[in-house]
Amino acid sequence: MEKFRSDLSNKEFPISDKVSGKLIRDAILELIKKDYPKFTSDSYLSISELNHYRDKHIEGSVTKQVGKVTELEKTVIDSLKGKTTLINKLDTKDKQKLTFGQRVADKVASFGGSWTFIISFGVFLVIWICINIYWFANKGFDPYPFILLNLILSTLAALQAPVIMMSQNRQEEKDRERAKNDYMVNLKSELEIRMLHEKMDHLIINEQQEVLEIQKQQVDMLNEIIKQIENKKIKKDKTEKDK
């Protein structure tokens, strides 16, 4: 396999990974020159080395826009570098973050706001009243006017307010996490679109140079053919004159 030596790291790479400094955007070229001052537009490097500086350029762009790279931006940049899906990371991250109290709050809120709870609690009240009135002939453990049942309902009403507040707090936390996730997904999409544009520009410039090279070769071939034709004409004219 044919190889070339990178002017950046002085390592050998396949010739298919060879990239000319002329095809690199000015912003990335300046970033490379900070680490390697001798690197110029006439030098060559590999596509993997170019991708490394593209990642650095993206990180710098994010830092300029946001001001400071937070944990959210780091997660997005790591996902770009590792070429992994961001959704799976967010799901595992959310599951690891939940504490025991938060999981209990989610379950209590989901059960307390369901028809299952309403129907089951209504059935419990009917059974309680029927047992005390009909089964124990209103002489049971909680005869009419059901003082014990009123105590239970008052206790439940007292606990209802903090349970509702707890569920509202959890909902706010979920909304914040959802907003953070949306922000990270949108940021990654924007950065990937930028990288895609850059790669497309690189391919277009590279193709244009190849087309120019082919055109130069064709022009040289045409000039050679024209010279050959002219030489043949001159020889033919000489032979005719000699005759």
Image: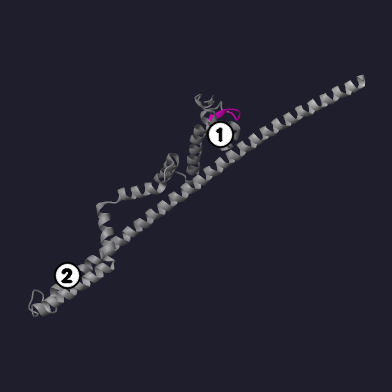
User: Is residue 41 one of those drawn in magenta?
Assistant: yes
- Label 2 belongs to which residue? 152
Residue type of the residue flagged with mark 1: Glu
From the top left corner, tell me how far across and down residue 108 is, in percent.
25, 61
Residue 159 image-quadrant placement = bottom left
Residue type of the residue flagged with mark 2: Ile
Asked which secondary structure carries label 1, the reply is helix
Which quadrant holds the C terminus? top right
Looking at the image, is 63 positioned above or below residue 115?
above
- How packed is label 1: few (under 14 Cα within 10 Å), some, or many (20 or more)? some
**Start and end of the magenta stretch?**
40-45
Looking at the image, is 117 positioned above or below residue 82?
below
Q: Looking at this rendering, what residue extends furthest in the front direction?
A: 243
Q: Is residue 173 left or right of residue 61?
A: left
> Which residue is at 47% across, 51% downward?
186
User: Is residue 230 one of those drawn in magenta?
Assistant: no
From the top left corner, tell me how far across and down residue 28 is, in percent.
55, 36
- Label 1 belongs to which residue? 30
